[in-house]
Image (cartoon, grey):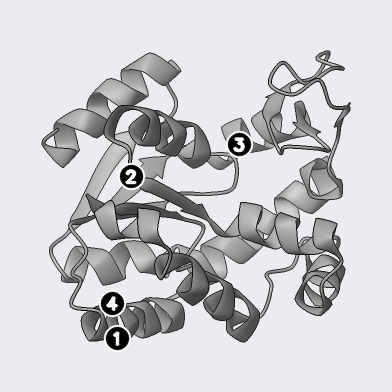
Amino acid sequence: MKIVLLGGPGAGKGTQAQRLVAEYGVAHISTGDLLRAAIKAGTELGKKAKSFMDKGQLVPDDLVIGLVKERLAQDDAQKGFILDGFPRNTAQAVVLDSELSDMGIALDAALLVDVDSAVIVKRLSSRRTCRSCGYTAPAGVDVCPRCGGEMYQRDDDKPETIQHRLDVYQTQTAPLVEYYKGHGILKTVNGDQPVDEVYKDVKEVLGL
């Protein structure tokens, strides 16, 4: 299983990726997690990335590509992987295709979790994230059920920033849908339904 996950911020891509990882044992490569880890570690890349993320802007390609290449080279990714949050524009998709080709790897599918923008704004503005492990839960959950860490509202989950993120997504990331459709590997599921139903559809379109 070598797939790219597509969909707006808050569409539920991470949730579906976690389920696939748990059931099939492939690597979940989330650029958001990679970037947050770099920020938490206080690396130079992390500091640069934070200045963009706090404004709801996309982190520049060269920073993200470097992180993803390192991650793809790790042992667990050799069994299969789910790329979540990368590529986020067609320029990155072309680079990814080139990098994978050099590694003798071809993508099996690009999976689009499709959710209306209004639903996404409502979802994200009520989302809380664990400071320690990145676990997400609805507002009202103050202690992380996974590690006991503090839950907080990320700057990029505030309504005004969410709308900006959606605008950026439509401009830069949505064209990926056409890119992968043109390559004949696009699969689409309706993300505006119960999580279990979405996962059932995901497995069906991926032939699992």
Amino acid, disc 3: Ile
- Give the mark nearer the N terminus: 1 vs 2: 2
Residue type, label 2: Val
Residue placed under numbered mark 1 in the picture: 98
Q: Compared with residue 68, is residue 208 higher up or lower down, i.e. above or below? A: above
Could you classify mark 1 by the number of other residues whose Cα lies within 10 Å: few (under 14), some (14-19), or many (20 or more)? some
SS at mark 2 in the image: loop
Q: Nearer the viewer, mark 4 or mark 2?
A: 2
Q: Which residue is mark 4?
A: 100
Residue wearing tag 2: 26
| Distance between mark 1 and mark 3 Cα atoms | 32 Å
Res 162 label: none
99, above or below 84, in the image: below
Residue plotted at (29% across, 79% down): 97
Q: Quadrant of the C terminus?
A: top left
**Real-space Cα distance between discs 4 and 2?**
16 Å
Callout 2 crowding tier (Cα within 10 Å): few <14, some 14–19, many ≥20: many
Q: Closer to the N terminus: mark 3 or mark 2?
A: 2
SS category of the residue bearing label 1: helix
Q: Is residue 7 above or below residue 135?
A: below
Q: Quadrant of residue 83?
A: bottom left
Q: Point out the tag, 4 or 2, that comes first from the N-terminus.
A: 2
Residue at screen point 77% across, 60% down? 56
Give the residue number, with chain letter if any, for mark 3: 120
* Amino acid at circle 4: Leu
Of label 1 and label 3, which has the lower sequence position? 1
Mark 1 or 3: in front is: 1
x and y, in percent, of residue 190 in the image: 34, 32
SS at badge 3: helix
Q: How far apart are the two marked residues, 1 and 2, measured between alpha carbons? A: 22 Å
Q: x and y percent of residue 171 in the render?
A: 55, 69
